[in-house]
Amino acid sequence: ESGVFGIGCGNRRIRRQRRRRPGGARHAGRAQGRTIPRSSRGAGDGRSLQDMIKLWDISRTLSNDFAEWPGDEAFRYRLTNEIPKGATVNLGAISMSVHNGTHADARFHFDAKGASIEKAALDVYLGRATVVDLSQPFSHLKEKHLITIEDLRPHAEDIAATSRLLVKTGRWSDSTVFPDRIPVVAADVPAWLQKNGVKLLGVDLPSMDEID
């Protein structure tokens, strides 16, 4: 493998049964801008609460109708205690494969001797990223199947500057239906990414690999 970390599609919020179709951001789920105040307490640099950081949530929402990888354990949420049934509190339980929704693949996922996810350096996942939107070519050319160097080369300067690349294909618009086929990275792309200093690659798809 190239040594580039991969992110497949995802989750940050959890909801029960109610269906919502994603549709918009990097991740087929619509991006939601969340503005979070940066506290100036103890900073000593004159920053005020009006200094803001804007976070874009591009993760997929997990629900009981989320389409899992065929043969994998589906996401399930259930209430184990309910106040209306006499319990003192409401409690829930979750079962799922760790590859449902937006997730990161550790090297252990494809290498029996590779490091597991808790050993991954967090700084790889934190910082600026370049988003390359390929949804138009992928929607206009149904036979298009590869994410190629030619797709990425116009953004090479930004990609090298941020070292993190998110690719939007728009090919998985409904999280409740698992796709029959997904775009994959062309064979020569990993070496090109390494040459440009990329340490993280994210896609809006269930995997970096072919489904079969």
Image (cartoon, helix red, strand yellow):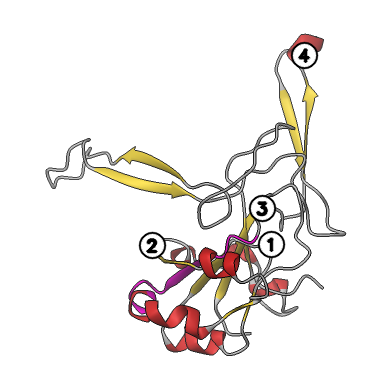
Q: Nearer the viewer, mark 1 or mark 4?
A: 1
**Nearest to N terminus: mark 4 or mark 3:** 4
Q: Which residue is mark 2?
A: 127
Q: Residue at x 71, y 80 (%)?
A: 113
Q: Is residue 92 above or below residue 149?
A: above
Cβ atoms at labels 1 and 2 below 8 Å apart: no
Q: Nearer the viewer, mark 2 or mark 4?
A: 2
**Nearest to N terminus: mark 1 or mark 2:** 2
Q: Secondary structure at mark 2?
A: loop
- Label for residue 101? 3
Could you tell me residue 109's position as x and y percent? Answer: 71, 71
**Nearest to N terminus: mark 1 or mark 4:** 4
Could you tell me residue 150's position as x and y percent? Answer: 48, 84
Q: Nearer the viewer, mark 2 or mark 3?
A: 3
Q: Which segment is the magenta one?
A: 159-171
Q: Residue at x 63, y 76 (%)?
A: 144
Crowd around label 1: few <14 · some 14–19 · many ≥20 (10 Å) = many
How far is mark 1 from mark 4, CA to CA? 38 Å
Q: Nearer the viewer, mark 1 or mark 2?
A: 1
Viewer-proximal residue, 201 or 22? 22
Quadrant in the rendering for residue 75: top right
Crowd around label 3: few <14 · some 14–19 · many ≥20 (10 Å) = many
Q: Amino acid at mark 2?
A: Gly
Q: Is residue 74 above or below residue 113?
A: above
Crowd around label 2: few <14 · some 14–19 · many ≥20 (10 Å) = few
Q: Which residue is mark 4?
A: 87
Could you tell me residue 47's position as x and y percent? Answer: 16, 43
Q: Nearer the viewer, mark 4 or mark 3?
A: 3
